[in-house]
C-alpha cells in the first residue's frame, strides 16, 4: 500500500474575504499551480488541437478517461508502448477518471454489484466488468499521475435508498482501491447526491483513508443551479485544508469562479472545447455565437482583451466564414481561444487571491458574466 507523499500539495495563500486559496501540486512530471483548469482529452487527445498548442497556452495537466481508453485502443496497446504519456506524446501530468460517470451516463447498459460494475461497450455491445482493483490496475498501467477510484454517481434526484447505497459502495470501493494502489496519486471521490447528510458521511469515511486528494463527484448532473451552488458551498468545508480539492466536470465560467470562491482547487470540463466546435466562444465581453449574421462583416478581433493566436490574427468575420463553411481550421482557432479564456480565468483568479482583490473581482464576475443558454 502506498505511503502518501506529504509534499504533494502545498497551500500558498488563503484569501482574506472568501474561502479561495492558491496552492501547488507537485507530480513527477509537472508542477501545477492552483486554482487550475484541466482540458479534457477523453481518448488521449484534446479535440482539434495538438500538444504543442496545449503547452503554448500554459497547460501542464490534462484529463483522460479510463473507460474510453480501456475500450479503445485497449490497455495492452498502452502497456506495450510504456504508458499513456508515451502513447499520446504528452510529457506533462495526466489525471484519469475512473469511468464512474460512465456508470451514471450509460446506466441503461450497466449493472452495479457489490464487487464492481458490469457494463456493455457503447462501441460494440461487448460485456465487461470493472472492479475497484481493476480500475487502479488499469490506471497504473497508464502511469496516470493522478487516479480516480471506481465510484457510483447517482442521479441528482435519487431517493434516499439509492443515495445511501451509492455512498456505501463508493466508500467500500475506495477502501479496496487503496489496498492495491502502489504508485503516483489516488484521490477519493465524495458522493452523496444532493443530500448534505450523506455528503458529510461519505466525506468523513473517505478522509479516514488519508488519500492524497479529494474530488467532489455527482455535481452538474442536471440539478437546478441553486442546488448545485449549495453543494459547491457545502462540501469543500468538509475536506482537509492541506489536500487538493477537485470539482469534477463543472466548467461554466461563473461556476468555476464560484467554486474557487468556496475553496476548490481543480476543475475539468468538456465545455470550452465542445462549445468551440459548436461556434460558441467565451470572451471578456460575454459569449459570442460566431455563426450569427451580425458578425458577417465585423473586422474586429473576437476579444480585444485576449492575446491568443485567433484574436491576434483574425477577425470575427473570418472566424464566422470558417465556421459557416465547416472548415477544420474553425475548430482549431475556436478551441485555442476558448482554452485561452479558461486558462486566463483561473490564472486571473490566482493573481487576485495573491494580491488581495479576489473577492471583489469574483463577486463582480459572478454577478455580471452572462449565463450559458
Image: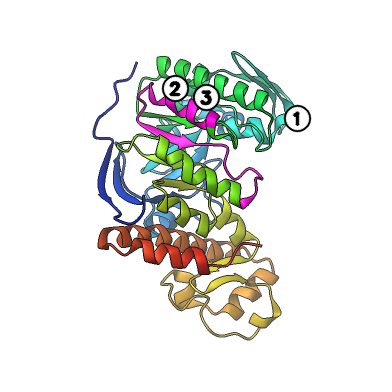
For image coordinates 28% across by 62% down, the residue present is: 356
Quick check: 227 above or below 200?
below
Q: Which of the two discs, 3 and 2, labels the residue nearer the N terminus?
A: 3
Q: Are marks 3 and 2 in contact (CB under 8 Å)?
A: no
Residue 202 x/y as whole percent: 49, 26
Q: Which of the two discs, 1 and 2, labels the residue nearer the N terminus?
A: 1
What segment is highlighted magenta in the picture? 197-225
Tag count: 3
Residue 298 x/y as whole percent: 60, 85
Mark 3 Cα shell of 10 Å, populated few (<14), some (14-19), many (≥20): some
Quick check: 64 above or below 299?
above
As rendered, which of 236 and 253 lies closer to the eye?
A: 236
Answer left or right for 20 relative to 74: left
Which mark, residue 205? 2
Q: What element carries label 3?
A: helix
Q: Which of the two discs, 1 and 3, labels the residue nearer the N terminus?
A: 3
**Residue pointed to by mark 3:** 76
Residue 327 can be seen in this image: yes
> From the viewer's perspective, is the residue at label 3 or at label 2 nearer?
2
Residue at mark 3 to residue at mark 2: CA–CA distance: 34 Å
Amino acid at each position: 500500500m502506498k505511503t502518501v507523499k506529504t509534499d504533494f500539495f502545498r497551500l500558498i495563500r488563503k484569501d482574506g474575504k472568501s474561502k479561495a486559496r492558491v496552492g501547488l501540486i507537485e507530480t513527477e512530471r509537472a508542477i501545477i499551480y492552483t486554482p487550475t483548469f484541466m482540458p479534457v482529452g477523453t481518448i488521449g487527445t484534446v479535440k482539434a488541437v495538438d500538444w504543442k498548442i496545449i503547452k503554448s497556452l500554459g497547460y501542464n495537466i490534462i484529463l483522460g478517461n479510463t473507460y474510453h481508453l480501456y475500450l479503445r485502443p485497449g490497455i495492452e496497446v498502452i502497456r506495450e508502448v510504456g504508458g499513456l504519456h508515451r502513447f499520446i506524446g504528452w510529457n506533462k501530468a495526466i489525471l484519469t477518471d475512473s469511468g464512474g460517470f460512465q456508470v451514471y451516463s450509460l446506466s441503461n447498459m450497466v449493472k452495479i454489484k457489490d464487487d464492481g460494475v458490469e457494463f456493455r461497450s457503447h462501441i460494440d455491445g461487448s460485456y465487461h466488468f470493472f472492479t475497484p482493483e481493476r480500475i487502479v490496475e488499469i490506471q497504473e498501467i497508464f502511469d496516470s499521475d493522478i487516479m480516480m477510484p471506481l465510484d457510483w454517481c447517482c442521479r441528482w434526484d435519487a431517493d434516499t435508498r439509492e443515495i445511501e447505497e451509492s455512498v456505501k459502495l463508493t466508500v467500500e470501493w475506495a477502501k479496496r482501491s487503496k489496498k492495491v494502489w502502489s504508485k503516483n496519486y489516488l484521490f477519493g471521490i465524495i458522493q452523496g447526491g444532493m443530500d448534505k447528510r450523506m455528503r458529510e458521511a461519505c466525506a468523513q469515511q473517505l478522509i479516514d483513508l488519508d488519500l492524497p486528494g479529494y474530488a467532489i463527484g455527482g455535481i452538474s448532473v442536471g440539478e437546478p443551479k441553486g442546488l448545485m451552488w449549495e453543494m459547491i458551498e457545502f462540501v469543500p468545508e468538509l475536506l482537509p485544508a492541506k489536500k487538493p480539492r477537485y470539482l469534477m466536470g463543472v466548467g461554466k465560467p461563473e461556476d468555476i469562479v464560484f467554486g474557487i470562491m468556496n475553496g476548490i482547487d481543480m476543475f475539468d470540463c468538456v465545455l470550452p472545447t465542445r462549445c468551440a466546435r459548436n461556434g460558441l466562444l467565451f470572451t471578456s465581453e460575454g459569449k459570442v455565437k460566431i455563426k450569427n449574421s451580425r458578425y458577417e462583416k465585423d473586422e474586429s478581433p473576437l476579444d480585444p482583451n485576449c492575446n491568443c493566436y485567433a484574436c491576434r490574427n483574425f477577425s470575427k468575420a473570418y472566424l464566422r466564414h470558417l465556421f459557416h463553411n465547416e472548415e477544420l481550421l474553425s475548430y482549431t482557432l475556436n478551441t485555442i481561444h476558448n482554452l485561452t479564456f479558461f486558462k486566463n480565468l483561473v490564472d486571473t483568479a490566482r493573481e487576485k487571491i495573491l494580491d488581495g482583490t479576489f473577492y471583489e473581482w469574483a463577486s463582480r464576475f459572478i454577478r455580471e458574466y452572462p449565463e450559458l443558454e
